[in-house]
């Protein structure tokens, strides 16, 4: 079967949903985002593609820091709510148990499975969104999502977002161990 050319868009793979936190006018504000990913390993740098018109982005720029909060599947309704309503019109401070870390102005959500406290290192404006690059200063996890002191994705049960269906999903089953499963692979196309 031949591949079919389709319109460009964020269809390459499902994206993790995060709640981006920033302090705005002295109060925590949170927005839902899916255009987020790891941009560098050490130091760990994350990239967030966000419209600079969001209230949360005002706080990111003003304070020079932000948080990424990874909600579990059971938080789908409040996560969607944070994406539907602007912090300019709705006070989101009371939605969560907020805590702060070393940076002191990057609000984090206690109910979320994982939290990354990030220092803003660069902004790159594009036509619609701005890319906010943040160095992860500290990472926090709820105790109930750890196995042997490490994040357990079955327990975390992160929300995943897909386009073009605009759907929320759960993480699927574990398939194999990376950097191991392919060691014995031989393709019928390879010469013997």
Image: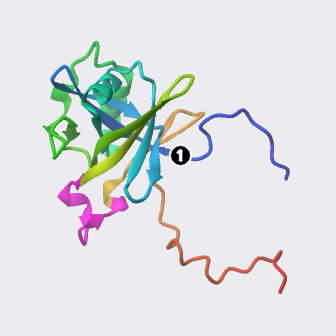
Tally of numbered discs: 1
Judge from the rendering whether residue 106 lies leftward or rightward of residue 170; answer left or right: left
Residue name at image x 22 percent, y 37 percent: 106
Camera-side residue: 159 or 132? Answer: 132
Residue name at image x 40 percent, y 49 percent: 45
Give the x, y percent position of residue 10: 59, 37
Residue name at image x 14 percent, y 37 percent: 97
Q: Is 88 drawn above or below residue 153 in the view shown?
A: above
Quarter of the figure with residue 18: top left
Q: Is 136 drawn above or below residue 146 in the view shown?
A: above
Instruction: Please say whether residue 70 is one of the residues in the magenta stretch.
Output: no
Residue pushed farthest top? 89
Figure quadrant of the C terminus:
bottom right
Give the x, y percent position of residue 50: 44, 29
Instruction: Please say whether residue 145 is one of the residues in the magenta stretch.
Output: yes
Residue name at image x 54 percent, y 27 percent: 126
Judge from the rendering whether residue 95 lies leftward or rightward of residue 33; answer left or right: left
- Which range of residues does the magenta coloring cover? 140-154
Residue pushed farthest front? 121
Say which element carries label 1. loop
Give the x, y percent position of residue 34: 45, 37
Q: Is residue 169 something that shows in the picture? A: no
Camera-side residue: 183 or 163? Answer: 183
Q: Is residue 116 something that shows in the picture? A: yes
Judge from the rendering whether residue 8 lies leftward or rightward of residue 121; answer left or right: right
Q: Which residue is mark 1?
A: 14
The local crowd at label 1, few if under 14, some if 14 to 19, many if 20 or more residues have their Cα within 10 Å, is: some
Give the x, y percent position of residue 122: 41, 37
């Amino acid at each position: 079967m031949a591949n079919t050319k389709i319109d460009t868009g964020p269809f390459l793979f499902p994206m993790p949903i995060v709640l981006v936190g920033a302090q705005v006018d002295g109060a925590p504000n949170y927005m839902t985002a899916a255009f987020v990913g790891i941009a560098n390993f050490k130091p760990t740098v994350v990239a967030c593609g966000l419209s600079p018109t969001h209230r949360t982005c005002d706080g990111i720029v003003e304070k020079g820091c932000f948080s990424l909060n990874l909600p579990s599947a059971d938080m789908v309704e409040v996560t969607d709510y944070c994406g539907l309503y602007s912090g300019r019109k709705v006070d989101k401070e009371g939605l969560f148990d907020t805590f702060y870390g070393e940076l002191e102005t990057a609000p984090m959500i206690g109910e979320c499975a994982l939290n990354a406290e990030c220092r803003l290192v660069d902004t790159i404006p594009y036509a619609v969104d701005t890319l906010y690059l943040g160095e992860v200063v500290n990472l926090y996890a709820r105790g109930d999502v750890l196995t042997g002191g490490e994040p357990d994705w079955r327990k975390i049960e992160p929300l995943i977002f897909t386009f073009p269906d605009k759907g929320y999903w759960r993480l699927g089953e574990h398939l194999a161990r990376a950097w191991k499963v392919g060691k014995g692979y031989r393709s019928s196309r390879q010469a013997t």
